[in-house]
């Protein structure tokens, strides 16, 4: 009887000493050697390290591509984008870092003069020595300094003597015949009036009958017509003079 009471008291003392010396663990059980497990509770939960779900979804920060299988997903911390595994390779799913500035400007940026150069535009022709292909439109003759040029065919253009150096007559307005009499052997000239051009001429020997009239020359000169005969016969030199517009 006394022995039973003694052992009972001893047990109570031992339990009291154990309870008094108990300290709450400073980390999750067992013995701080494992983290708390993820569970189905409603409280927020955090897991250190990467997590793979159903061998497809890979949640974590990967600086290089992990082993992939079709349908797998992960976030690439080097490229700052999500990637999905398809057809034996990882492809970007977007999510890249936003653009911080455009042309050195931030905020709501709109294009301004000088933002773009020919080299920034695909297919644009350079300003110096451009090469065009296909049908080019929108360019007028005035743009290239040829405002007075027309598209008249050569066969439709009239050919006239130039009134003065550098001029370009458009057409004949009126013509008259002028003459000078003299002796053919002396040489006779006929000058056209100012503002006209000599378009032709000839020589007439007066009353030579059946006599030999010898050699005769007749040709244009600077402002009219020139005539000359071998023998001293009375002659008349003619010139056709026309006013040109």
Image (tube, grey):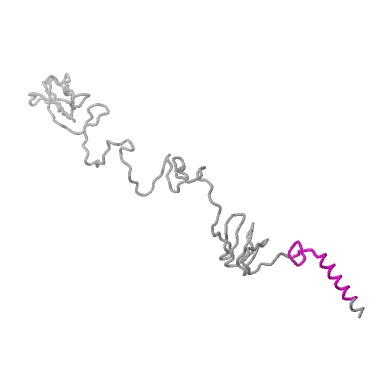
Q: In this rendered view, identify the residue nearer to me: 11 or 210.
A: 11
Dividing the picture into quadrants, the one containing residue 25 is bottom right
* Residue 94 appears left or right of 227: right
- Residue extending furthest bottom? 1
Q: Residue at x 64, y 66 (%)?
A: 52
| Image position, residue 165 (x, y; %) | 26, 27
| Image position, residue 213 (x, y; %) | 13, 25
Q: Residue at x 26, y 41 (%)?
A: 151
Q: Residue at x 42, y 40 (%)?
A: 127
Residue 210 on the magenta segment: no
Q: In this rendered view, identify the residue nearer to me: 194 or 91.
A: 91
| Image position, residue 164 (x, y; %) | 24, 26
Specify start and end residues of the magenta stretch as a single range: 6-33
104 is higher (above) or lower (below) than 231:
below
| Image position, residue 71 (x, y; %) | 57, 67
* Residue 50 appears left or right of 228: right
165 is higher (above) or lower (below) than 153:
above
Residue 23 on the magenta segment: yes
- Residue extending furthest right? 2
2 is higher (above) or lower (below) than 29:
below
* Residue 60 appears left or right of 176: right
Work out which quarter of the rendered image holds the C terminus and state it: top left
Disc tally is: 0
Q: In this rendered view, identify the residue nearer to me: 134 or 107.
A: 107
Q: Residue at x 23, y 41 (%)?
A: 155
Work out which quarter of the rendered image holds the N terminus and state it: bottom right
Dividing the picture into quadrants, the one containing residue 186 is top left
């Amino acid at each position: 009887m006394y022995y039973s009471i003694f052992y009972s008291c001893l047990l109570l003392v031992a339990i009291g000493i154990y309870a008094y010396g108990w300290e709450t663990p400073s980390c999750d059980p067992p013995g701080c050697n494992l983290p708390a497990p993820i569970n189905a509770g409603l409280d927020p939960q955090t897991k250190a390290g990467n997590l793979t779900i159903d061998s497809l979804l890979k949640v974590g920060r990967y600086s290089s591509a992990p082993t992939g299988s079709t349908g797998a997903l992960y976030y690439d911390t080097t490229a700052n984008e999500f990637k999905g595994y398809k057809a034996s390779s990882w492809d970007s799913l977007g999510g890249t870092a936003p653009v911080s500035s455009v042309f050195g400007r931030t905020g709501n940026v709109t294009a301004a003069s000088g933002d773009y150069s020919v080299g920034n535009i695909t297919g644009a022709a350079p300003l110096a020595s451009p090469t065009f292909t296909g049908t080019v439109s929108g360019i007028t003759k005035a743009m290239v300094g040829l405002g007075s040029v027309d598209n008249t065919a050569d066969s439709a253009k009239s050919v006239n003597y130039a009134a003065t150096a550098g001029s370009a007559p458009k057409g004949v307005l009126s013509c008259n015949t002028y003459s000078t009499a003299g002796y053919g052997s002396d040489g006779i000239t006929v000058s056209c009036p100012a503002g006209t051009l000599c378009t032709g001429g000839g020589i007439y020997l007066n009353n030579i009958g059946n006599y030999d009239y010898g050699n005769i020359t007749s040709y244009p000169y600077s402002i009219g017509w020139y005539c000359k005969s071998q023998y001293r016969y009375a002659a008349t030199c003619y010139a056709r003079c026309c006013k040109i517009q």
